[in-house]
Image: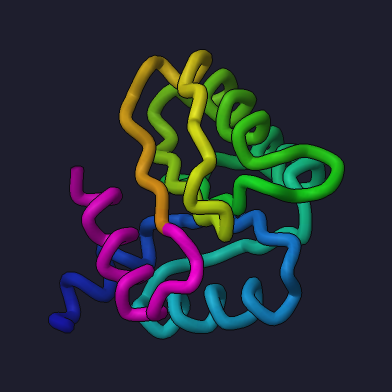
Amino acid sequence: MSQSQSVERHMQRILLAEDDHSLRRFLVGALERAGYAVIAFANGAEAYERLKEEPFTLLLTDIVMPEMDGIELARRASQLDPDIKIMFITGFAAVTLNTEGTRERAATVLSKPFHLRQLVTEVDRVLAA
């Protein structure tokens, strides 16, 4: 990775909402090693409170979580910041996304299990779009 790519990635702020502690730790590590600034929360409600305080470039969220699921979090995030990019991760391959309230935009869904390199590639792609 070139120095300009590293600086560009570091300016991209990612808010991660994932209720599985081990997976959350692995995801943060992989994204930080790739040069991204990541703030992580264990549920959608905590992540939403942080979104209200400061802007993020990307919301990376599990779909099925306690307190507030990822779809509701994405809907609320889009209302706060129409430009935020959204990416879902899920262990439920058959989940159907209702994108109403997220401006009918196509959402990227990464199904578990996935390789951490695949995650970084997808995040790069979503942020470059």
Q: Is residue 101 above or below residue 56?
A: above
Q: Residue at x 70, y 81 (%)?
A: 22
Which sits in the foreground, 29 or 97?
Answer: 97
Residue 64 at x, y percent in the picture: 69, 48
Q: Main secondary structure of the magenta part?
A: helix
Number of marks drawn? 0
Range of magenta residues: 111-129
In the rendered image, the vertical position of residue 74 relative to residue 37, given as above or below: above
Identified at 55% across, 55% down, the residue is 90
Answer with left or right where residue 85 lies relative to residue 100. Answer: left
Nearer-the-camera pick, 56 or 66: 66
Q: Is residue 95 above or below residue 26?
A: above
Q: Relative to 36, is 101 above or below?
A: above
Position of residue 123 measured from the top left corner of the image (x, y, whole percent): 33, 59
Q: Quadrant of the N terminus?
A: bottom left
State the quadrant of the C terminus: top left
Going by the picture, which residue comes out furthest to the right? 67
Toward which corner of the image does residue 54 lie, by quadrant?
top right
